[in-house]
Image (spheres, grey):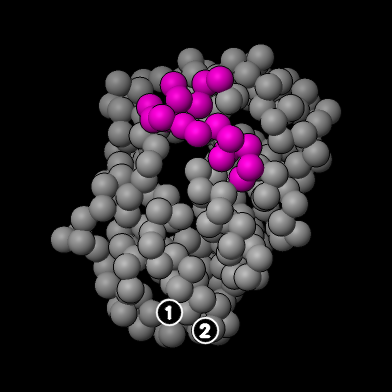
Amino acid sequence: MQFIIGGIQKTSLIDYPEKISAIVFTQGCNFKCGYCHNPVLLKKSKDDSVSTESFFDFLKKRQGKIDGVVVTGGEPTLQIDLKLFIQKIKELGFLVKLDTNGSNPEIIEDLVQNKLIDYIAMDIKAPFYKYQEITNSKINIAKIKKSISLVMQSGIDYEFRTTILKSQLSFQDFEEIAKMIAGAKKYYLQKFEVKTEILDTSLVNEKTYTNEEFNNIIEKLRENIEKVELR
């Protein structure tokens, strides 16, 4: 199986809403966001990987103890055998949550159509005009737009989320994001916090908005989005 695992977290109470989950971290990402807190996962390296066999051996021991598995990254949709990997998880009776940056809508569509995922969390990095700046990557905006549409029309539970540095995203930028995901069910604003190593160390001392400022942003976003909360 061509699926490179960078690490496993055996139990989480917060990564899959209202479920107890295990987390599998995939290696490799096509974005290079400066605030990325998993920089060791950006490149694929089998030398530092966990075998899929050992992961499934572990998962079998978790049957009846956890509800689901969060497949995150890196960017999981870059994995050649993502579909097969998730099929095997589902065969063991677990729910599956996929974390994605939305750069590969065709993969998301295939997983949704085959009923292989139960929850999708898609990152909204910025307004479309700032995507390349924030991700430090060449972005196909049409694919991001398609993924947003697919997620909202998937018929399964989902959320959008954005990590926020005050220097990167303005109040006006949130107005644009609100238009991008207008009608969405859930949108989470994630405070930028340095708890571990990040990709761009020059951002270590960067600030996010105050709670009062966040409240103003949330109030505005709720005009277009059903549920908006701060994490």
Residue drawn at the location 58% of the way across and 35% of the way down = 142
| Image: 120 above or below 176 | below
Contact check, label 2 and label 1, Cβ < 8 Å: yes
Residue drawn at the location 47% of the way across and 61% of the way down = 71
| Image: 155 above or below 57 | above
Q: Nearer the viewer, mark 2 or mark 1?
A: 2
Question: How many numbered markers are drawn?
Answer: 2
Percent position of residue 6, x then y: 30, 59
Crowdedness of circle 1 by 10 Å Cα count: few (<14), some, many (20+)? some
Percent position of residue 213, x then y: 65, 19
The image's mark for residue 59 is 1
The outermost residue toward the left is 47
Q: Which amino acid lies under the numbered mark 2 shown in the image of this protein? A: Leu
Q: Which residue is mark 2?
A: 92
Res. 12 in view: no
Q: Is residue 109 left or right of residue 194?
A: right
Residue 132 counted in the magenta span:
yes
